[in-house]
């Protein structure tokens, strides 16, 4: 059911410093900061030949990554995002298998303008999983 690895997300305490490190030290292509108020984060995408890195920083009150950064003040890998051909079919199959779909269970529009859903990390080996409509 899951397809390509769309991105690996890293929560960072200093977005500018992390973006500069990927650009200047690692020599990667770094996109401009992108506020995502509906998700409570600002993102910077790093373009790699085979996938993307999504740098995440809290935006506004009640950001879903605030607790994660409080527990991991130096930052850390926050989630992995897989593409699926049919996000509603994927959701229903996962729910039937007992996985917890986060939020109200309805897809939201993600950073690429496509529907996304999140699955509880405790149901996936301690890794928060994002699904994105391909
Ligand atoms: C930009 C849009 C979009 C895109 O298009 O790419 C994005 O990526 S948005 C990214 C940010 N959005 C989200 O993360 C939404 C989904 N997340 C959530 O709903 C919550 O963050 C959460 C996963 C339910 C955690 O909620 P929280 O209030 O932080 O609960 P706890 O701190 O109590 O955590 C419970 C439990 O889970 C562990 N945990 C939390 N986050 C992670 C994580 N990222 N990876 C692995 N494990 C995680 C946490 O440590 C707790 O464990 P215990 O302490 O053992 O109970
Ligand atoms: Co993401």
Image (cartoon, rainbow, N blue to C red):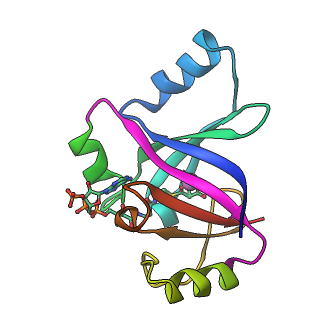
Q: Give the range drawn in magenta.
A: 73-87
In the image, is residue 108 above or below residue 34?
below
Side (left or right) of 31 relative to 56? right
Residue in the image at 65% along x and 35% along y: 32
Residue in the image at 55% along x and 26% along y: 19
* Residue 43 vs residue 126, the one in the foreground: 126
Identify the main secondary structure in magenta: strand
* Residue 116 vs residue 111, the one in the foreground: 116
Residue in the image at 46% along x and 52% along y: 41
Instruction: Tell me where residue 84 appears, x and y as whole percent.
Output: 72, 68
Instruction: Tell me where residue 118 appears, x and y as whole percent.
Output: 50, 68
* Residue 61 vs residue 133, the one in the foreground: 133
> Which quadrant of the render holds ligand 1?
bottom left
Which corner quadrant holds the N terminus? Answer: bottom right
* Residue 76 vs residue 1, the one in the foreground: 1
In the image, is residue 36 above or below residue 97?
above
Side (left or right) of 85 relative to 94? right
């Amino acid at each position: 059911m899951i397809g390509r690895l769309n991105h690996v997300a890293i929560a960072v305490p200093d977005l500018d410093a992390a973006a500069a490190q990927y650009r200047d030290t690692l020599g990667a292509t770094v996109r401009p900061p992108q506020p995502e108020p509906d998700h409570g984060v600002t993102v910077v995408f790093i373009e790699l030949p085979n996938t993307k890195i999504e740098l995440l920083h809290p935006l506004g009150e009640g950001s879903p990554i605030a607790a994660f950064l409080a527990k991991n003040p130096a930052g850390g890998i926050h989630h992995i995002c897989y593409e699926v051909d049919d996000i509603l079919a994927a959701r229903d199959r996962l729910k039937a298998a007992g996985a917890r779909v986060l939020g109200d269970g309805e897809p939201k529009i993600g950073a690429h303008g496509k529907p996304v859903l999140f699955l509880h990390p405790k149901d996936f080996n301690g890794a928060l999983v994002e699904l994105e409509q391909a």
